[in-house]
Amino acid sequence: QIGKPGAGPFSLTGQPNAMGGREVGGLSNLLPAHRDLANEGHRNEVEKFWRVPLGTIQPKAGLTATEMFEALNEGKLKAIWILCTNPLISLPDVRMAEEGLKKAKFVVVQEVSNRPETLKYADVVLPAASWIEKEGTMTNAERRISYLNKVVEPPGEALADAAIICRFAMKMGYRGFDYPGFADIYAEHCALTAGTRIDISGLSYALLKQHGSVQWPYQKQSDLLTEKKRGTVRLFTDKKFYTSSQKAIIHSFPDINESETPDKLYPLVLTTGRVRDQWHTMSKTGKVNKLKQHTSESFLEIHPEDALQRNIKENELVEVFNNRGNVRVKAKYSIDIKRGVVFLPMHWGKILNSDLNRANNLTSKSIDPISKEPDFKFSAVQVHPYRKKKQTIIVIGAGAGACGFVKSYRALNADDDIIVFSKENLPFYNRVLLPDYISGALPWDSLVKMTEAEEKEYRIRLWPGISIENIDREKKLVTDNKGQMHHYDVLIIATGSRAAMLRDVPTLKGIFTMRSRKDADDFKNHLNAENGNVVIVGGGLLGIELAASLREINVQVTIIQRISRLMDRQLDPLGSQLLHGELIDKGVNIYYNDEIERFLGEQQVTGIRLKSGLLIDCQAIVVAIGTVPNIELAKNCGIEYKRGVIVDEYLQTNDPAIFAIGEIAEFKGFLYGITAAAEQQAEIVARYLNGDISKYYQGSLLMNILKMQGTDLCSLGLAVCPDDPGYEEIVFIDKAKRNYKKCIIYNDKLVGAILIGDKSEFLEFRDLIQNKMELSDKRLQLLRSGKKAQPVIGRLICSCSNVGEGNIINKINEGCKDLVQLCQISGAGMGCGSCRPEVKAILEANTKIFKSDATMAEL
Ligand SMILES: Cc1cc2nc3c(=O)[nH]c(=O)nc-3n(C[C@H](O)[C@H](O)[C@H](O)COP(=O)(O)OP(=O)(O)OC[C@H]3O[C@@H](n4cnc5c(N)ncnc54)[C@H](O)[C@@H]3O)c2cc1C
């Protein structure tokens, strides 16, 4: 077929620039223009061209890439200079290669990216320019050479690879590297091809710029011939080929496997390759978050029959292994793959310090004798489900973090013992809804997150009313408030926070904080709508929600705010001003820039005097000024802490058997006071304890949704635009109607948003910020999409996203039978998550099928 229109070679190579590398003699056994190092005539041609004495070029080939790393391992090679490749992901048998790099005496890494793991081993890093930051040519599989312009200047000290090499050679005292420019390097390469089969001696940067691209060969006279201006469109039209007989030779392969032979021990063939949206080792594509949305983690593609034979369930963690190493990823059933063959993508390298997602731990070093390509497509392996040792897990606290942990853990592991100790004598419940419980809008049952029957289903042992008082890390024992000791293999501290209190508060009846059901019950029992005003100290989210709930039952409310505006950490000044208007409309009194100076009353609080001198009568005071993490247990047993318990990306403390999640966890100097963070952290720990290292904690998006009847208000990420020209603001405002939308953008990513009056974009913005998605064209659409919020149908279920019971039922009737999907498409349960049990109940009532909500943290 070669030589006919419509036919051409189909290159199966996958290495970056494999074709270009060969053309310029980039392999250790090659000279420029497909010349062979072993061929004396070829060596002499190059020697003459370079005007060096014949015999200067040694016939002995250097080491191939794989051999170099072997030689490093054996101490035969001492120094290595790595450029344009990322060997600690891309080499076969890569654990061996890594050992070699560890032993190297001197490592130079020339790189465009800060991601490759080789950088960790580099004695010298040479920052290189990427393709867009330098000029050059690119040849594709139809022999087409294109000129690539430099589009932007390289950052910092980065230089084009060729410039680095020339500078180095000149410093070393070599002649002939003082090229005036890159065009001159290319001119030399073109001249060196004269008379060869890839003759481009007629080509230059100037010609390429003029014609755009040409196909080689392009001899000296080509530019004179009109029809040849674009080079040689088709080769071999005369059916004369580059063989000694000029006839095409079809190489037949004996039907024997020259790769590793699968056997009883390793019966499956592993093939490796790429996924759609990633290129090679992701050193560049891995920086584009949009591309990660397609496939965010590694996986093993396996035929369902092979999987069933091994008791492997879809999405279950499996171990792929042979005598070179192992990989641990989730199994993905596919009938696109043959029985007996499994596929691993090659993109993933080390994740934090673990190489368990690195496909090349398993591939063999054998190479093709001609191309020197490693045998990436055929390694013998075995696969089995990953099974961890049975463990006893003790969780201290039964709040949002603990509940998330139990659900995530049970979705992955049915065997381990989970024991939960709770200081509160109650089942798992949702403290976020306490303001609605106080106003009577919700009965207690609606706050319960896990019924006794569900506790049994989840196979946990919950000890309500039993607190843990001491941790003995050496013996792995915890002691409860009754003096009983309990052994753990893994301990999860999820003790949350307590409410912060004002200083010097007298012991008067009627002064409350709001963290638990007991606080809510005590307050409810005390409250009498007839008895007048309730003072709330603190104009944050909790204080405002409580104020709004109290107004629902006609209790007079006054908020005292120490500074000049409301929700100052979650809103900008304009947002606070609009919120002020909403609260005033609801009849809430607000005093700014003031504090309580004195509590009035004898046994029972009857009023307060503010620093400004103002006297306010009240029947009760609720202090909502923030929280204090309950870290005493951790502190007393020597676990590292600052404001919270210090944790790493797997929420592990400095004791590998102890993890901390929720409001007590301090990650990179940050404590997160939101349910979503506690649940995300819980899921990471659950996965990690079950052997999955692929997802790790990178912090949570701070999102705040005010739950206040008739008012839509939320904020995500940054609320105030930093004073830096890199940040942009997009604002829509209709002050009279209290409609305000603001987006903050940095580096083509949405980093913050405020939505007041209509929060239809909440989910979209949350995903954009959370996934750090590049906006590109979407930037222009951000506040112009004209999206209309769906009207609430029936009883309001989700006050974060304004979703009614009817909206949810409609989605179920349209065919959605899966809880996670139902939340995603209806929007319910996607904010604080409090309404998920209700969404689940609606789903169950309207269908008989539902999927466990164990993976809800993924939302
Ligand atoms: C009224 C209110 C409204 C809120 N609104 C929102 C909202 O709208 N959105 C949002 O995202 N977040 C909101 N939050 C915050 C959210 O509730 C918390 O971020 C979340 O509950 C933290 O979960 P956690 O597991 O860390 O701690 P918690 O849920 O506080 O649970 C910790 C549990 O551990 C127990 N404990 C402590 N010490 C011990 C011990 N030694 N032994 C045994 N048990 C112990 C505590 O008694 C408590 O039950 C709100 C909180 C309150 C109080």
Image (cartoon, rainbow, N blue to C red):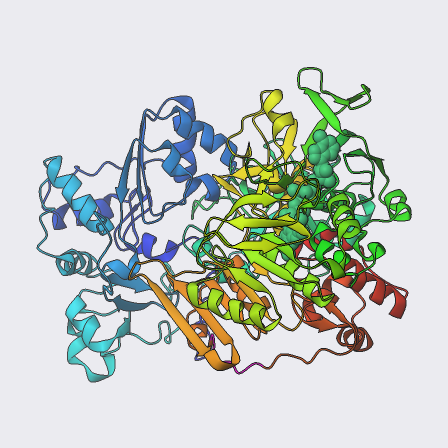
Residue 356 lies, with reference to residue 520, above or below; the image says above
Q: Is residue 270 left or right of residue 200?
A: right
| Residue 262 shows in this picture | no
Q: Position of residue 136 (x, y in %)?
A: 24, 61
Q: Residue at x 77, y 44 (%)?
A: 518
Q: Nearer the viewer, residue 104 or 652?
A: 652
Residue 69 falls within the magenta-colored stretch: no
Find residue 512 and report its horizontal and vertical position in percent. Answer: 67, 45
Q: What range is drawn magenta here?
A: 782-787
The residue at the point 18 percent across, 67 percent down is: 205
Where's residue 500, x and y in %? Answer: 59, 40
Q: Is residue 784 above or below residue 327?
A: below
Q: Ligand 1 is found in which quarter of the picture?
A: top right
Question: Which image quadrant is residue 127 in?
Answer: top left
Above/below status of 538 relative to 578: above
Q: Is residue 29 visible?
A: yes
The image quarter in which residue 428 lies: top right
Tell me if residue 387 comes above or below residue 182 in the rendering. Answer: above
Residue 763 as seen in the image, left or right of residue 459: left
